[in-house]
Image (spheres, coloured by chain):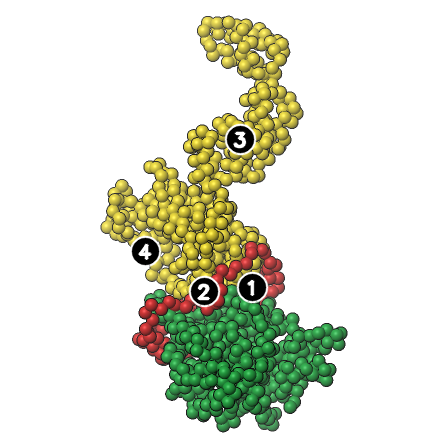
Amino acid sequence: MGKYEAVIGLEVHVELRTRTKAFCSCPNEFGSEPNTNVCPICLGMPGALPVLNESLLEYGIRTGLALNCKIAQFCKFDRKNYFYPDLPKAYQISQYDLPLCRSGYLDVETEEGARSIGINRVHMEEDAGKLMHGEGKADFSLVDLNRGGVPLLEIVTEPDIKTPEEARLFLENLKTILEYLDVSDCKMEEGSLRCDANISLRPAGTDIFNTKVEIKNMNSFRAVQRALEDEMERQYALYESGESPVPETRGWDESTGSTIVMRSKEEASDYRYFPDPDLAPVVLTREKVEQIKETLPELPAARKQRFVEEYDIPAYDAGVLTSSQELADYFEECLEGYNDPKKVSNWVMVEFLRLLNTNNMDVQEAKLTPSHLVEMLQLMEKGTISGKIAKTVFEEMFTTGKRALTVVEEKGLMQISDEDQLAGIVDQVLAEHPEVVEDYRKGKKKALGFLVGQVMKITRGKANPQMVNKLLLSRIQ
Amino acid sequence: MEIFDLTVYQLKEMMEKGTITAREITSVVLARIRQFDADIRAYVTVTEEDALAAAQEVDQRRKDGEKLPPLAGIPLGLKDNICTKGVRTTCSSHMLDNFIPPYNATVVEKLNKCGAVLTGKLNMDEFAMGSTTEFSAFFPTHNPWDLERVPGGSSGGPAAAVAAGEAIYALGSDTGGSARQPASFCGIVGMKPTYGLISRSGVVPFASSLDQVGTLTKDVRDCALVLNAIAGHDPKDNASAAVDIPDYTTFLTGNIKGKKIGVPKEQLGDRLDPRVADVFKKALDKLEELGAVVDECSFPHAASAVPAYHIIAPAEASSNLARFDGVRYGYRAVPDDGKEYDLLEMYMKTRGEGFGPEVKRRIMMGTYVLSSGCYEKFYLKALKVRTLIRNEYQRLFQDYDVLVTPTSPYLPFRLGDEVDDPLELYHSDSYTIPVNMAGLPAISLPCGFAEGLPVGMQLIAPAFAEGRILQVAHAFEQNTPYHQQRPPLKEKKGSES
Amino acid sequence: MKLTREEVRQVAVLARLALNEEEFNELYGKFNEVLEFVETINNIDTENVEPTYYLMPVQNVWRSDEAHQPLAPEDVFLDAPERDGSFFKVPRIL
């Protein structure tokens, strides 16, 4: 394989989370009863005319800017003509030769360092409806047009991607950016983010373009990587046996972990693109674009960089914390109440993320808010609870949403720092384990840990560990 | 004159004076339909009950002292490509035999607000493709002036209905002359306003960049009244212009002294029937007599408008008509052997059986000129020719207030004469097509008769200068008798049976 | 330029129009006749002429992102040739 390198380009379709559809005022909702979010426009009834949704344009510009694209001063809509039951007008409103955004890039961190992946274009279009096929031998299909006319952005990369892993990293980065921009849910399983890939192989180090194959039907980022890996091997085997791939579209089959031919390119449709005479062209002034630029949030790459510099945390940690906007916001909100980035980052990255994952929850869904964490950290600092107890408190807060102090009081988790009380317990432990004391005195320093443990056991973890240490040492040394 | 011969304006005056009610007028028009439509065949659907109910409501409102708009209570017909909620809208095609739109076209909404009385839906060439109304999938419409002749097209039903007194006025559509040419053939006034003046929302499209709703009325004042009611910005139509709409009746001054009128000499060439040429020359004399300055001018690209049009219009149509696929509404082919079609067969048979021959020809041509490898040679080239035509008009309107041509080079054809010769039919629209290519307003008004058949004259103005052509047309009309002439209808079907 | 019968048949498939033999024969002749006619525009010099893509006198037409009531279910299926519950029904797609 080493003598070949892959040339990969991605085509990503993103469903936008606008309130309404692209060219009509029907609600843009997932999961409604079939054919309830439809009107004469998205049903393609004769005489009904499209009118552009302002949000589609705005989301498109936001996305283009975030992907470092040039925003067109003039763009238009075109009709892509083909017959299919999920396409009511028998043409899709799309953009052909003058897309909204061009010539951008997105950086990804790979093991070999940073790579800049070129973005060829970002354009606006409308989604098709959904088809359901009858069970078994049924000779019919069913059409639901709720999704018909939902706004999409099509994002097309340059063939800059060199490995399947890079493709996955690109998609993960893209998803994070789109989430930061708040333009899409990016749920691959619900189809709000879909990805097709083009791949060809060439002798390593050359710049020729061999026959490319299109891969569809990948329903996760992991699947994209696996499908591309599989296709690389298939093409490699072809070249090695003296054959060449043919231009075709192949579908990824998750169950078999391989791709199968969907159609050959000779059957490719003739889409007869032409400018849609029903939609006015869009002319964007520099001011309008600047206005939108000013509303862009701090994007993941910039935020990560700032976290490293401002909070002095490792790049890896900053990367994890900025991988979602909610998490990064959560982190910074905690810092406002408790300004110890390392400590906070530790709690957020380790405990908080672990609990979210086990419970399959999003940051917004968590009952444990930044102020919960802040109050708990303050209790630790005051010595009211120990670090060990804090973990218990944290889990309890996560489950119930109760405040730290309430949890501590209800469960009697207050740290015991009363010297007289602890001295009694320490004496009891020493009396019960004379052989351990003996071990310690013979130089087995580890024996101290056992004794501390015994004190903790009796106090159910509430004893102030420093104080226990001090009391033990003063008696056995 | 009989009630059905009167104009919107005359009937409005009478209703305001209380000498007639909307219900009486409507009853007269409905009776006229019953009496003559078996011969004329203008109507695809007659909405008698709704019409009477609407008329009664107007009468009640008037009785209650409400001040009503001029069109209130006046019966009209709509070309059957204008969508009417709950009323079958067929485009005279088997494809939409039973199509009942769940929405109204914007013009219908506007008319409803005026208290208009809809008597029914009118015949046309299927999907507005044709110049004779013989391409209706249902039946041809007959010219009230001579039942052996066509009423023109594609708005043949609307024009024939108005000329025959089966409607006081009508709305049609005009993509390449479809309102003006039938107006000319039927001896009435037909206006195609500027592209963007009237909303296209709810009008079944033929060619989106050329289509415009047109008016068919008995005289120029009625045309102004109808325009007042239906013009104006509509957020549902991107092409709809946000311009101020004047009261078009204020242009009817009767005075055209000093108006500069250009006559493009290329449009008086070979094809022009000498009988039409004669009538047209006399009309020009009349305009001069009224004080206008009439001048010959040159429009060299006029001829190229027709082939360019027959690329652009079918291209857009092939895409606009692709939605008729038998899935959500309209005709769906079913095999007669009890088997099931697969998807491709269902599509092909549905469209093959649902569309008539002319529509299929145009879809074929449109599909071809947009297909891979053809776009530049045909479609893009035609768009460039379109620019040349627009530029030429622009140049001419620096020197002239309006341009004038015959509306059609021909007198109304005999039924069946031209239906098999598409090219000949395409050429018959050569005076009206350039206007659509540039999106300009134009009117056709009666300017005389040849062998008992009406001849129409076309006036063209710059975009949104409808007032200017109404002014010239009105002055001409006031000084000629043609608009008052009515076809001598005698029942034919009735006496035969 | 004349299209062959096979080429015209391909256009008919692209346009999804089933034509019987008689219909095809008639259409074939007329199609080429009209094609020859419209091709004459290639004799016109359009050097340095921009195409007119739009006649509409406007640009930047959009609406605010506010939902309207969708069509009532009885109207959605008012004209449907075939439905199955709340779906439109079509021959199976393979």
Q: Residue at x 40, y 82 (%)?
A: B297
Q: Marks 3 and 1: CB-CB under 8 Å?
A: no
Measured in 3D between alpha carbons, the distance from the residue under mark 3 to the one under mark 1, in whole angstroms, is 50 Å
For residue A244, say whether it is visible.
Answer: yes
Instruction: Label 3, secondary structure: give it.
Output: helix
Q: Which mark is residue A276?
A: 2
Q: Colour of chain C?
A: red
Q: Chain of mark 4?
A: A
Q: Colour of chain A?
A: yellow
Residue corresponding to mark 3: A335
- Give residue B440's position: percent from left, percent from top: 48, 74
Of mark 4 and mark 3, the one earlier in the sequence is 4
Give the residue type at disc 1. Pro
Measured in 3D between alpha carbons, the distance from the residue under mark 1 to the one under mark 2, in whole angstroms, is 17 Å
Chain seen in green: B
Q: Nearer the viewer, mark 1 or mark 4?
A: 1
Residue corresponding to mark 4: A247
Q: Marks 2 and 3: CB-CB under 8 Å?
A: no
Measured in 3D between alpha carbons, the distance from the residue under mark 4 to the one under mark 3, in whole angstroms, is 54 Å
Q: Nearer the viewer, residue B318 or B203?
A: B203
For residue B189, say whether it is visible.
Answer: no
Q: Nearer the viewer, residue B72 or A230?
A: B72
